[in-house]
Each structure stands twice: as structure tokens, then as C-alpha cells.
Amino acid sequence: MSRLYLGFDAEERAQSPYARFFNPVMAPLPGHVLEALSKGPVAHELIMPFARAAELQDDGYAPVETGYTLAPDGSARIACLTHMPRVTPAMWHWWFAWHGSEAQRYKLWHPLAHVDVAWADGRGDTGTYLGRTSNIVEYVGAPRLNVGVRFVPPAEAGFDSRRLEEQGAVAIVGRCLMRDLNLEAGWLIHLIRPVPGGSEMRSRFWLGGPHINPIGMTGAFGKALGGVAAKLRPFTAAQAAELMIHDAQEMNHLAAFLPELHAAFGAAP
């Protein structure tokens, strides 16, 4: 990782090709997110478990599209809906491949929380994110975290790739990593589907509980160690709320200028 700091420094503001898209003034949280925060945790049955993640492909909406809960298995479940006028699902598919090779790109997404990013394989922008791990430094709430996402094909979460194509939708699926602890800590999914005038993103996170295991250890021993780690470091309702806020902030912020960013850099190598 490079020198760690928030924002663009004076040289970057003057010389970076991305500087015109860096805007530290972020819009207020949408009303439906503020409403979810005011309600606090919801009943766990209202946010689907990871085993039912493929239901995000279904038409309509879940009982809770924006909210969070703590499930009986010890995991946290977070949902967040983002409305994105002018944005297409393909733009997000491009973004997840493009942003991970430079901190300056990553900082555009959440200028008040994103610090650094790099692909674990050491390669730069290869035009794909599938099968790769993104090493991330970011703030979620007050803590600065060393985390990561190992991106996997949507089929690993039960999605039907052919149906996604027919729907014009994109599913971003990743295994969430806590790098300081060498743990796989959960799953994330961003399902982006077209709607009149643009797209909407249905985000889901499942963290902690049975989703924890040491990185690279998927057998019974890894599951046992993960169970110990889950009890020692349980996710809290406050952490779930902070992640919902973070997701709402970054997705709404980037969506506001993603069409222009894609037009400027989408065809670049």
C-alpha cells in the first residue's frame, strides 16, 4: 500500500485526470435511509439469509429493502436500496473492474472515507474483477479498517447468469475479508437492475456468525475456528447501522456522476 491519507493532495488536485470528479461535498442521506436508521434493527425474518440471496433476481421488492438486523445465528444482515437515474447496470460492472487499481479512483467513490485500494495479485487495471481480491483501506464510521473483497462469479451465490443477462441486470458478489485478522467475515451482493430512467441497486451484506472462517480454510476445521472467532468478535447493531450508512453514502455519491465518469474513462485501457 502507498502513503495513506484521505482526499486528494494539492498535486493530485492539480494534475490527476480524475480530479474534476473528486467532490468532497456529499449529498444528505436519502429519506428512506434516514427512516431505516430511525427504526433501528428490524426482525431478522425481514432480511433474507445468504442461502436465499438469489431471490434478489425476482421481480418486486423484499419486505425490507433498506435496514439492518442481527440474526439468531450471530450474523448481521444489512440491506440498502439505491435509486440511480441515468445509470446503467453495465456502468457498475465497469466500475468494479476499473476502480481497484488506483487509490485516486477509489477515493472518488466515497471522498470522506476511502483511503487506499490495490489488487492482491499486483496487477493493475485488467478490465475484470472476477476471481480477484481487492485490498482496501477505508473508514466505516470512525474506525479505519484494513479489509478486502474477493470477487466471485454470481453463480456462487445461486444466481442464474442467463437470467441476469435476459433481465439486463448485473450481480456483484464478493467474499468480505478482515485482513488484519486473516478472516473471511461475510458476503456482499450488489444487484443492479434497470428501471425506467436508469437503474436501482439492491445491496445486501451478511457478516459474522457462520460466515466467518480463516482465509483459505473452508473445511470443518476452518468452520470450527470461524465459530470461535465469531464469538470473540461479534458484529453489533451499531456496526451494521454504520455499514448501511456507508453503503448509502458511497453508492448515491458515485451514481450522481457515474455516467460522466464512464464516458470519460470507460473506453480507456
Image (spheres, rainbow, N blue to C red):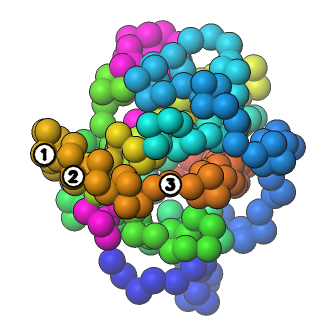
Q: Is residue 107 left or right of residue 147?
A: right
Q: Which residue type carries mark 3? A: Phe
Please state which of residues 183 and 99 is positioned toward the viewer in this rendering.
183
Please state which of residues 30 and 101 is positioned toward the viewer in this rendering.
30
Query: Is the residue 255 above or below the residue 242 in the image?
Result: above
Local packing at callout 2 (Cα closer than 10 Å; few below 14, some 14-19, many 20+) is some
The label on residue 225 is 2
- Look at the numbered disc 2 and give the secondary structure of its residue: helix
Residue 125 spot, x, y in % from top left: 33, 56
The label on residue 235 is 3
In the rendered view of the protein, which quadrant contains the N terminus? Answer: bottom left
Q: CA distance from mark 1 to mark 3?
A: 22 Å
Residue in the picture at 63% in, 67% down: 141
Say whether residue 127 is magenta.
Answer: no
Q: Is residue 228 left or right of residue 259?
A: left
Which callout, 3 or 2, points at the residue further toward the start of the chain? 2
Please state which of residues 258 and 64 is positioned toward the viewer in this rendering.
64
The label on residue 11 is none
Residue in the picture at 13% in, 45% down: 221
Residue 264 spot, x, y in % from top left: 57, 52
Say whether residue 175 is magenta.
Answer: yes
Which range is magenta? 158-182
Q: Is residue 101 visible?
A: no
Q: Is residue 145 visible?
A: yes
Residue 52 spot, x, y in % from top left: 46, 20
- Look at the numbered disc 3 and give the secondary structure of its residue: loop
Residue in the picture at 62% in, 63% down: 110
Residues at discs 2 and 1 in contact (Cβ within 8 Å): yes
Residue in the picture at 50% in, 63% down: 106
Local packing at callout 3 (Cα closer than 10 Å; few below 14, some 14-19, many 20+) is some
Q: Which residue type carries mark 1? A: Phe
- Look at the numbered disc 1 and give the secondary structure of its residue: helix
